Amino acid sequence: MASMITKPSHLRCILTRTGKCLAVTWTKTSFGSERSYASKTDGESRIPKIYTKTGDKGFSSTYTGERRPKEDCVFEALGTTDELSSAIGLAREFCIDKGHTFTDQLEKIQCVLQDVGSNIATPLSSARESHIKKTKFSSQPVADLESWIDEFTEKLPPLTSFILPSGGKSSAALHIARTVCRRAERSVSPIVRSGEADPDVAKYLNRLSDYLFTVARYIAMKEGNEETIYKRPE
C-alpha cells in the first residue's frame, strides 16, 4: 500500500550537519511507520528505499503507533480504500482520453480518499490530540459530492429501469469503481460504529458510490453510448 502511507503534511524532517555530512531522518509516515534515511555522505548519494521490512512478520503500524496484524479491520479498510482510489484513477484516464471536463473532480476525490485513509489509520482509542488534529475528517467533502450529484442529475433523463454496468469504457470503469466503493464502505462501517473513525468517513463513501453511478450514466450519455437495460431472462 505504498500510495496510502505517505502524506506530506504528516511528515517531519530533521536535518543534522556533521562536517560535510547531511543526514535526513523521517520520523513518521502518515500511518505511523518509522523510517530513517541517510542522504549524502562524503562523495556518496543514497536513494531512499521503498521497502522497510517492518511488516515482514505480518504486522503493520497505525498512525498512532499501534502494531496490529495485517488482517486487522483497519488495514482491510485501508487496502480497500487504496484499491478504490486506483480504480478511480484508471477511470479518470479513460475520461481524460475522451476529453471530459470534470476529471478534476475525480482527482480531488482521490486526494480526499487519502484523507479518508489517514482518518481510518488513526484509531481514536489510541490517538492523542495531536493525531486527531492532523487526521480529522470534515463534512465539506460530503457536501461537495452532493452538489456534484445534483448537477449531473439535472442533465440526465429519469432512470426508469435497472441498468447493467455498460455505456462505454469510461462508464464501465466508473461502475467498477462504484462497486469497489461499496466494498470500502462495508469495510469502514464497523470501524465507524465502534467509534474508532469519524462518522463523516462512512458518509463520504456512501455518497461517493452514488456520485460514481451518476457520473457513469452521464458519461454514457455524453459519449452517445447506449446503456444496457436489465431484462429478466425468459
Image (spheres, rainbow, N blue to C red):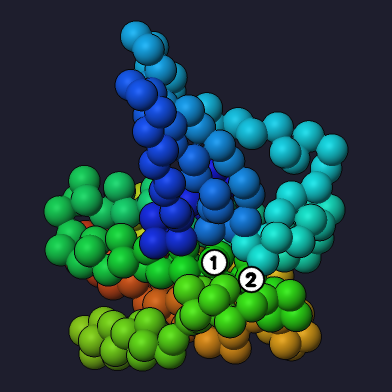
Q: Is residue 43 above or below residue 196?
A: above
Q: Could you tell me which secondary element the residue under label 1 belongs to?
A: helix
> Left or right: 101 with respect to 210?
left
Residue 109 falls in image quadrant: bottom left
Q: Is residue 202 visible?
A: no
Report whether 59 appears left or right of 134: right
Q: Nearer the viewer, residue 34 or 18?
A: 18
Between 201 and 35, the one lying in front of the other is 35
**Which residue: 49% across, 40% down?**
25
Residue at point 53% right, 58% down? 30
Confirm or deny contact between disc 2 and disc 1 (CB under 8 A): yes
Image spot of residue 225 (x, y percent): 28, 60
Q: Give the vertical position of 152 relative to 168 (above or below).
A: below
Q: Is residue 109 visible?
A: yes
The residue identified by callout 2 is 122
x and y percentages locating residue 181 in the rendered image: 55, 68
Residue 47 relative to residue 233: left or right: left
Name the residue type under label 2: Thr
Residue in the image at 84% along x and 38% along y: 57
Q: How many marks?
A: 2
Question: Which element type, helix, strand or loop, lies under badge 2?
Answer: loop
- Say which of 48 and 199 sits in front: 48
Q: Nearer the viewer, residue 100 or 147?
A: 147
Task: Pick out the residue farthest to the front.
Answer: 19
Q: Name which residue lies at 72% across and 87% down.
A: 195
Three-letter code, disc 1: Ser
Q: CA distance from mark 2 to mark 1?
A: 6 Å
Q: Position of residue 230 (x, y in %)?
A: 54, 71
Q: Which residue is mark 1?
A: 118
